[in-house]
Amino acid sequence: NNTSGNNGGGIYIDSSSPVLTDVQITNNKAAGYSGGGVYIVSGSAKFSYVTVKGNGSANGAGIYIAGGTPTFPNSIITENIATSNGGGIYTASSSGISYTNISITKNKAATYGGGIYTDNATSVTHTMTNMLIAENEATSTYGGGIYFGGSSSSTIYTLTNVTVAKNKAPGSSSTGGGGIYRNSNSVNLRNSIVWGNTGGSSATTLARNITGATVNHSYNLVEGGTVSGATIISASNPLLGADYHLTSSSTAAIDKGYKPYITGFTPPVTTDLAGNARIQNCELDLGAYEYDIPGGDVNPSSNKRVYVNANIAVPGDGSTWEKAYPNLARALSAARYIDCIDVDEIWVAEGTYYPQHIPDSAANLSNSPTSRDRTFV
């Protein structure tokens, strides 16, 4: 509930690296200036389990990053309102920043970047990993979720396992960018979901989700996208839950990720945004959240056998009939990875089993769990 006549309504950080844990930064104002909640000039501040909520300013209503290398693990940036750009975060740092495990939701900007606005003009690489960007709005122009601005294409943003959903940006009637708008900077989107974003009234489905200059795709699910090889691998509804987690019906996104994008980090990313194991049954899902498998990972018996029973009351790891694994399709998928799980046999109890997987490079297929378009492996 603080008000500043300059930048940094709640907190102003310059040449220091404070560590903030379990802190709430709420309802602060920097009217006509930047950083309603937090303004960062330099340093390596760490915000762990911090909530930045209900703050207001011209730019970067939640957080304005002018410089430095701050981190925000397991933090929430929500319901901040900017009268210009960057409702949640405005970043202009010339240093490479790693944004990991952040939820950016329900923020608003009057012009660009309801969730995030970037303004970088230097040759630097930023990463965004395990992030949820949802229900943000750029009320009059573009980039409801993210607006990539700046003036340098040598600034690189690499987004990995990010969910961009239900953001809004009216733009003009024929344009969109409700999810992502790329004006400048280089943008690499990997293992991510972009779905259910809205834009101009006559914009194409793809433009409502992603528009502007070309985004480099790799293993993504994009509404309205053209499925092609390992770039956009699905345009099917991911059937996300109300909290944007994957559900048992989210087969367009389950097991579809490319693991080296996660294991290649230093240190490797081992959990998702919710803290669940990032790789389960040797597989990686798309988006911020991994589908947390009932019974956990398959764990064969000592004779390399997996037991499957769809009617098991309490799902187990498949090591015995008493601990039977419930899902045949997932057991078959796990058996493919002999370098990870060594399976010689799968024993299946009487019951009804459905294929769970949408074939690779297949779009616009039925989302019914009983669809004949689906496969077991």
Image (cartoon, rainbow, N blue to C red):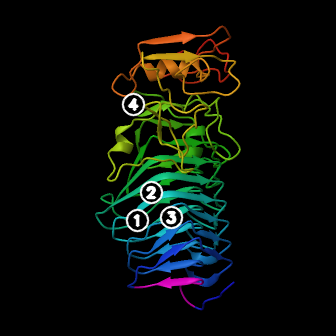
Say the numbered circle drawn on residue 230: 4
- Foreground of the two, 244 or 216: 244
**Left or right side of 34 for 140:** right
Is the C-beta separation of discs 2 and 3 under 8 Å? no
Residue on which disc 3 sits? 117
Vertical placement of 135 versus 237: above or below? Answer: below
Disc 3 residue crowd, few under 14, some 14–19, many 20+, Cα 10 Å? many
Residue on which disc 2 sits? 183
Is the C-beta separation of discs 2 and 4 under 8 Å? no
Residue on which disc 1 sits? 150
- Mark 3 and mark 4: span between their CA atoms? 28 Å
The image position of residue 55, as x and y in percent, is: 65, 75
| Marks 2 and 4, the one that precedes in the sequence | 2
- Foreground of the two, 101 or 180: 101
| Marks 3 and 4, the one that precedes in the sequence | 3
**What's drawn in magenta, residue-wise?**
6-14
| Marks 1 and 3, the one that precedes in the sequence | 3
- Mark 1 and mark 2: span between their CA atoms? 8 Å
| Marks 1 and 4, the one that precedes in the sequence | 1
- Mark 1 and mark 4: span between their CA atoms? 28 Å
Residue type at numbered disc 4: Ala
